[in-house]
């Protein structure tokens, strides 16, 4: 059994992001199943979101906070660069977590792919509302990674 426990489910991009960070740091962890909205879930994260990382007596939620925690407590490549590259990384994490997540992930991908997998009906009006916004976002995202291939500079973040 590993010292680190990662709660969430693999379909979540946020859980995958933390899994990649753990892998980059060379850290073993136990993937922990979690029923969304359960008593256990809300005890771990009262906001009812995933992922949640438990390390000893420390319970950390929110992907960015988990990445910062891993950088602060474990050796290995930095997940959030220092200096100007770190500021750009934080800027783009904010954009991804707010605008892209809301419009692309929830406004299009969730509607088109996840809902049918869970037997739910796709809401075409939600897709129609978000698709023009997504079409404006994608060129900006492409431009940001064109220099070094990564949002924060020349290294993966």
Image: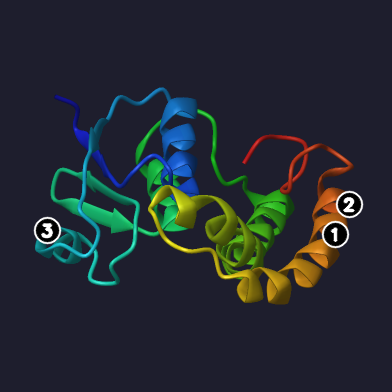
Q: Residue at x 70, y 35 (%)?
A: 155
Q: Earlier in the sequence, mark 2 or mark 3?
A: 3
The mark found on residue 143 in the picture is 2
Q: Are marks 3 and 1 in contact (CB under 8 Å)?
A: no
Q: Are marks 1 and 2 in contact (CB under 8 Å)?
A: yes
User: Picture coordinates of residue 144 (x, y %)?
Assistant: 83, 52
Q: Residue at x 76, y 64 (%)?
A: 134
- Extreme left residue here? 39
Crowd rating for badge 1 (residues with CA inside 10 Å; few <14, some 14–19, many 20+): few
Relative horizontal placement of residue 115, taking residue 151 as reference (left or right): left
User: Picture coordinates of residue 117 (x, y %)?
Assistant: 43, 48
Q: Residue at x 59, y 63 (%)?
A: 101
Crowd rating for badge 2 (residues with CA inside 10 Å; few <14, some 14–19, many 20+): few
Kindly report the distance in space between the C-alpha atoms of the residues bearing marks 1 and 2: 5 Å
Crowd rating for badge 3 (residues with CA inside 10 Å; few <14, some 14–19, many 20+): few
The mark found on residue 40 in the picture is 3
Question: Residue beneath label 1, please?
Answer: 140
Q: Residue at x 89, y 41 (%)?
A: 147
């Amino acid at each position: 059994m590993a010292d680190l426990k990662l709660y969430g489910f693999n379909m979540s991009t946020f859980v995958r992001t933390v899994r990649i960070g753990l892998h980059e740091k060379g850290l073993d962890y136990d993937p922990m199943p979690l029923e969304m909205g359960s008593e256990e879930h809300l005890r771990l994260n009262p906001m009812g979101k995933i992922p949640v990382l438990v390390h000893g007596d420390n319970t950390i939620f929110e992907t960015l906070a988990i990445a910062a925690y891993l950088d602060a407590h474990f050796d290995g490549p930095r997940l959030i660069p220092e200096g100007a590259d770190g500021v750009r990384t934080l800027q783009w994490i904010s954009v991804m977590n707010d605008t892209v997540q809301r419009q692309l992930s929830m406004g299009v991908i969730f509607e088109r792919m996840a809902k049918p997998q869970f037997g739910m009906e796709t809401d075409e009006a939600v897709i129609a509302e978000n698709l023009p916004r997504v079409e404006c976002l994608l060129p900006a995202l492409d431009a940001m990674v064109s220099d070094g291939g990564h949002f924060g500079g020349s290294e993966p973040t």
